[in-house]
């Protein structure tokens, strides 16, 4: 069912409890990347223009229910006010008398930023009373935090029990882009999955197999599959207890006539460190004291050929330890291949986005998803609590 957005509701004079994702990387009190703050601006500017009173809420880091001074949102409020060229009042808490008073005194077009919602244990527990208190700060709920939409927390879903919820523009963009891949992708539809978190992503692989025409597996993820095929992977990152699951996925691919592509050569070294000697081996030639840290040149060619005929692509997970120079070639070449695809391309995942930025091809990807876990769960076909709780579009 399509979800209603902020375009579907009269916002004038309305108090909007607006959940954003300002979980930005920080070094001390300095924001090292403000992409997520910038991504929220279209929604905030629209709410301001419509004369809404905007109460912003977000989490930052993992304070685990305690006040952690280094995770206070003052630097975020400052950066937001610079970007908007407007005053952003940062409050010292997200519930309580002082907050209520501040919100009551707001005028149309004004903004406040609540303190880190995860300073309260009740946030992640989706405590009903806590959600009710947050919801009392708004006439409506605006959810623009796609990155936490897969979590049923008080500020991401719980509030919708008390006030009607609408998608912000960023949320709408994510739903539309990922929805296209889920429901009506161009064909052939190729998924590229890599990275390190094998156990987290096995479910995604299984459900992607139902939808894609080809599944390309690289990076740390591929190692467990190569191990399952009987190769000795030396000191590579592997998850031996996932070998059975890997075998099942390979079997499922064969049974359903889907292509499953694994690396046919690998870049190996003694450690993922800059300047170490590297060599290229086939999967049955990984030395016992070395580890596979990137896909090899032949693999890059095969993957590129598969991608060249794709009309839709979903990519999550780097093809190697791209953070370290000698092991980034595979990831950068795959980024280039995906950028050149004649069709709809989506990249999701924190590290994958960093890799695409590094490649210089970010501008040529159709959609860069701001949510790592959330984009995977969406593509898996799971229902995300932060989306489900929103009002259905009539
Ligand atoms: P994303 O954040 O895009 O979802 P992941 O977090 O799953 O991706 O994986 C990214 C990490 O995987 C990177 O830190 C990268 O160094 C690591 N990685 C990729 N390939 C390998 C490999 N062959 N061995 C060890 N780590 C790897
Ligand atoms: Mg990651």
Image (cartoon, rainbow, N blue to C red):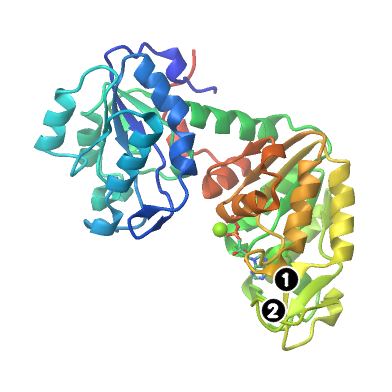
Callout count: 2
Residue, x 63% and y 32% (percent of image)?
A: 177
Residue, x 81% and y 71% (percent of image)?
A: 266
Q: Nearer the viewer, residue 379 or 252?
A: 379
Q: Are marks 1 and 2 in contact (CB under 8 Å)?
A: yes
Find residue 144 and report its horizontal and vertical position in percent.
44, 33
Label 1's element? helix
Residue 386 sits above or below residue 25 on the image = above
Label 1 vs 2, first from the N-terminus = 2
Query: Residue 164: in sight, yes or no?
Result: yes
Residue ID for mark 2: 275
Q: Is residue 84 left or right of residue 70?
A: right
> Image quarter for residue 185?
top right
Q: Nearer the viewer, residue 255 or 55?
A: 55
Find residue 391 and report its horizontal and vertical position in percent.
42, 22
The label on residue 225 is: none
Residue 93 sits above or below residue 140 on the image = below
Residue ID for mark 1: 326
Q: Is residue 26 left or right of residue 94?
A: right
Query: Residue 154: in sight, yes or no?
Result: no
Residue 369 sits above or below residue 284 on the image = above
Residue, x 55% and y 49% (percent of image)?
A: 372
Q: Is residue 6 left or right of residue 346?
A: left
Ligand 1 shows up in which quadrant of the image? bottom right
Q: Quadrant of the N terminus?
A: top right
Find residue 142 and report its horizontal and vertical position in percent.
38, 27
């Amino acid at each position: 069912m399509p979800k209603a957005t902020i375009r579907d509701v009269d916002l004038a004079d309305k108090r909007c409890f607006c959940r954003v994702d300002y979980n930005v990387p920080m070094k001390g009190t300095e924001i090292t990347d403000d992409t997520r703050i910038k991504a929220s601006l279209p929604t905030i500017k629209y709410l301001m223009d419509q004369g809404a009173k905007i109460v912003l809420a977000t989490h930052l880091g993992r304070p685990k229910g305690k006040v952690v001074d280094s995770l206070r949102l003052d630097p975020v409020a400052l950066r937001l006010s610079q970007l908007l060229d407007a005053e952003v009042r940062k409050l010292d808490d997200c519930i309580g008398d002082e907050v209520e008073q501040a919100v009551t005194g707001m005028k149309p077009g004004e903004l406040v930023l609540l303190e880190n919602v995860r300073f309260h244990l009740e946030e992640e527990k989706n405590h009903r009373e806590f959600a009710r208190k947050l919801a009392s700060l708004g006439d409506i709920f605006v959810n623009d935090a796609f990155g936490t939409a897969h979590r049923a927390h008080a500020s991401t879903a719980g509030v919708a029990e008390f006030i009607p919820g609408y998608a912000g523009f960023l949320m709408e963009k994510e739903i539309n882009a990922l929805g296209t891949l889920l429901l009506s992708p161009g064909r052939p539809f190729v998924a590229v999955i890599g990275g390190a978190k094998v156990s987290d992503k096995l479910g995604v692989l299984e459900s992607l197999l139902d939808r894609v025409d080809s599944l390309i597996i690289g990076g740390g993820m591929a190692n467990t599959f190569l191990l399952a095929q009987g190769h000795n992977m030396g000191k590579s990152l592997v998850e031996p207890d996932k070998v059975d699951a890997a075998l099942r996925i390979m079997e499922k691919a064969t049974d359903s006539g889907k292509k499953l592509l694994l690396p046919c050569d690998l870049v190996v070294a003694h450690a993922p460190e800059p300047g170490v000697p590297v060599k290229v081996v086939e999967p049955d030639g990984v030395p016992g004291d070395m580890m596979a840290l990137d896909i090899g040149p032949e693999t890059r060619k095969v993957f590129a050929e598969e991608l060249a005929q794709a009309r839709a692509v979903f990519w999550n997970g780097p093809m190697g330890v791209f953070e370290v120079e000698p092991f980034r070639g595979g990831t950068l070449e795959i980024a280039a291949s995906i950028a050149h695809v004649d069709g709809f391309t989506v990249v999701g995942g924190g590290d994958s986005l960093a890799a695409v930025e590094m490649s210089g091809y970010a501008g040529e990807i159709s959609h860069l998803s701001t949510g790592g876990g959330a984009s995977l769960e969406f593509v898996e076909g799971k229902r995300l609590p932060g989306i489900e709780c929103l009002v259905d579009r009539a």
